[in-house]
Amino acid sequence: MTSVRWFDNHCHIHGLDDAAPVVVAAARAEGVEGMITVGCTVADSVAAADCAAGIDGVWATAGVHPHDAKDGIDGLVELLDRDEIVAVGECGLDYHYDHSPRDVQRRVFEAQIGLAHERDLPLVIHSRSAWDDTFDVLDDLGLPAHTVFHCFTGGPAEAEAALARGAHISISGIVTFPSAQELRDAAALVPDDRLMIETDTPYLAPVPKRGKANRPANVPLIGEFLAAERGKSVESVASLTWDNARRFYGV
């Protein structure tokens, strides 16, 4: 058991074939003591909340992913009353796949921003190939006090735009990929108090775990990589990202 504490601020452990308690136990053996399991549809958000309710140190979000925006958000409002739910999302715009019409994506994104404002909850954003429209929507409605761009995939310009609006930026295992220099340049711009780390389990396993199913236990690999990139100790990066996640989600 390591003495360093890590926080995986974005994962999807409730939908894994592996039992969530087993996944959590493996993560804790690597020092990952806090996890946010993230909902992508209303039904998926129920599963995330149910999972979090049974495991200490795990919390959940409730949201509708842009891929599923076409199915609407009926039932989402009621979910936000559950104690396990600590944020709205993930929600946003995804023009890479366009699984839902863009106008519907925007409408559903706007509705969830409104819910985050109304409930004073953090907002978890997914944005892919849609930066201009994502920022336009946020500028129209205003960012909730705590807003994070999860699994950030932009470059320095997008990072500067997000930071200028007061958002946090969450870095995934993509930052370790040899082809991700633009993301590494963006990550270097993120102030210590706005940086978070995620696995996005079960996707995007970091080097040297590429090709394998990702798990929260891999958070230290991402943190160690960022520590080297930022010229900081691993302990300091663990501490600051732990504190940022706890403060951001109010847990």
Image (cartoon, grey):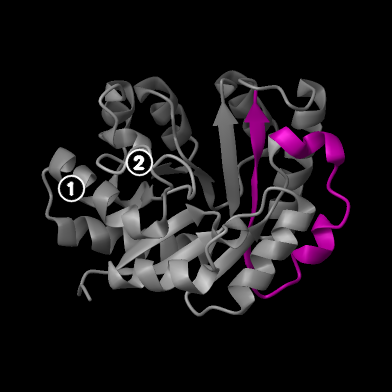
* Location of residue 154 with respect to 152 vertically, above or below: above
Mark found first going from the N terminus, 2 or 1: 2
Residue closer to the observer: 246 or 151: 151
The residue depicted at 37 percent of the width and 37 percent of the height is: 211
Q: Which mark is residue 46?
A: none
| Label 1: how many Cα within 10 Å (few below 14, some 14–19, many 20+) | some
* Location of residue 212 with respect to 247 vertically, above or below: above
Amino acid, disc 2: Gly
Q: Position of residue 67 (x, y in %)?
A: 71, 34
* Location of residue 7 with respect to 184 vertically, above or below: below
Q: Quadrant of residue 16?
A: bottom right
| Label 2: how many Cα within 10 Å (few below 14, some 14–19, many 20+) | many
Magenta stretch in the rendered image? 67-94
The residue at which mark 1 appears reads as: 227
Residue 251 visible? The answer is: no
Q: Which mark is residue 173?
A: 2
Amino acid, disc 1: Ala
Q: Quadrant of residue 98?
A: top right
Task: Locate the N terminus and report the quarter of the image it occupies.
Answer: bottom left
Q: Position of residue 163 (x, y in %)?
A: 42, 36
Label 2 to label 1, Cα distance in Å? Answer: 13 Å
Q: Quadrant of residue 183?
A: top left
Q: Position of residue 212 (x, y in %)?
A: 39, 44
Residue 18 visible? The answer is: yes
Residue closer to the observer: 175 or 115: 175
Tag 2 near tag 1, CB within 8 Å: no
